[in-house]
Amino acid sequence: MIKLIIMHVVESFSAGTFDFIVDLINGMNQYDHLIVHGYKSDTPQNFKKYFPQNTKFILWEDVGREINLKKDIMAFLQLLKIIKTVNGIDVVHLHSAKAGFLGRLGMRLTGNVRKVVYTTHAAPFLRKDVSKIVSQIFIRLEQLGMLLGGRVVTCSESELLEHKKHRINATCINNGVHLDRLTLSTFTSNVITIGTVGRISLQKNPKLFNQVASHFVGNSGIRFIWIGDGECRSELTSQNIDVSGWLSHDEAVLRMNELSLYLSTSLWEGLPLSVMQAMSLSKPLILNNCTGNRDLVINEVNGFLFSTVSEAIEAINKLISDSDKLIRMGAASKTIICENFSIRTTVQNYLKLYTAVCTK
């Protein structure tokens, strides 16, 4: 077995991307890992405790999410210095768009781009919160990044299709979750609890979540919960929505366990880990029909996809009026996740890719 040393580069060291990197590295803890990372307000405190002891860290101080020419040049120069000074790396794994572009440029300039794997974690051109002009800029940057070299990996088949539309060569390795860590505990209530997990941001579309919840105001048998917090919290004004605030991973799972069904109003996704975790807890799904989400629902089997508020409300009513269907669809979610989205399979596929790029 080849002894690999893997450098991960990530700007957005929080939320689903953070969880993915934690699971990936712990799944291959026989290797040495170096993480070059940004830091955000929702980066977990004491984050080092989530990683194996053979993981090292370098803070990428100057990097930010949005395009800013001056700051991006500073971030690139800092990353280039790190690339030049770190020796013995077998594979460089870039996570998300900013690290993906700057990292490939830096590796190209140092002549090591063949070592690069770039995972999109929801490509920036999928964003619905930017203008068409900005979206086109993102497409061009991703196309240019492809020309710089390295292997592009999407998180889902639907995201792969979007890349193909823009003639971006990529392969798909599905995200995965730990099937043996999330166990369904006994939780009984006469109230139907509908909820979601994640940062309250434009991507997650809290305005739509609020519209759906407000339809059920006055029905004491239904409540809504948003497990998380964020800059768009003020969008959640309906009186039947409970916002948990930031919780630890274990606390969030306990709250997720309370849910009768999982509702996602996201505008775009890669392949959402929170939805997959809900599936592993045997939750039926009602998901907005966007990239990533549509890979996880088989209509009328483990839930419903929707495109409008009225469709979401109709799907909720179908489920809450039939307790047998609620249980049956929840069980189907568990089956689908176990058969198709195990973290072990994800880790194995990345190890195969790492081996391929470092033995060229």
Image (cartoon, rainbow, N blue to C red):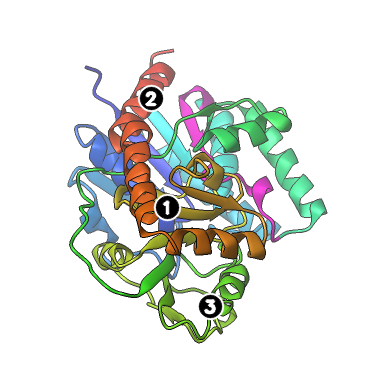
Residue type, mark 3 in image:
Phe
Against 81, residue 354 (above or below) is above
> Label 2's element?
helix
Mark closest to the chain's N terminus, 1 or 2? 1
Q: Gap in Å between the C-alphas at discs 1 and 2?
A: 27 Å
Name the residue at 64% across, 48% down.
124
- Classify 10 Å Cα crowding around label 3: few (below 14), some (14-19), many (20 and above): some
Q: Quadrant of the C terminus?
A: top left
Q: Which residue is mark 1?
A: 275
Name the residue at 27% across, 44% down.
178
Decide whether residue 265 is among the magenta residues: no
In the rendered view, does 80 fall on the left or right side of 187? right
Q: Which residue is mark 2?
A: 354
Q: Gap in Å between the C-alphas at discs 3 and 2?
A: 49 Å
> Label 3's element?
loop
Mark closest to the chain's N terminus, 1 or 3? 3
Q: Which residue is mark 3?
A: 216
Using the image as rendered, state which of residue 110 and residue 134 is in the foreground: 134
What stretch of residues is rendered in magenta? 113-129
Name the residue at 39% across, 77% down.
245
Q: Residue furthest right?
A: 133
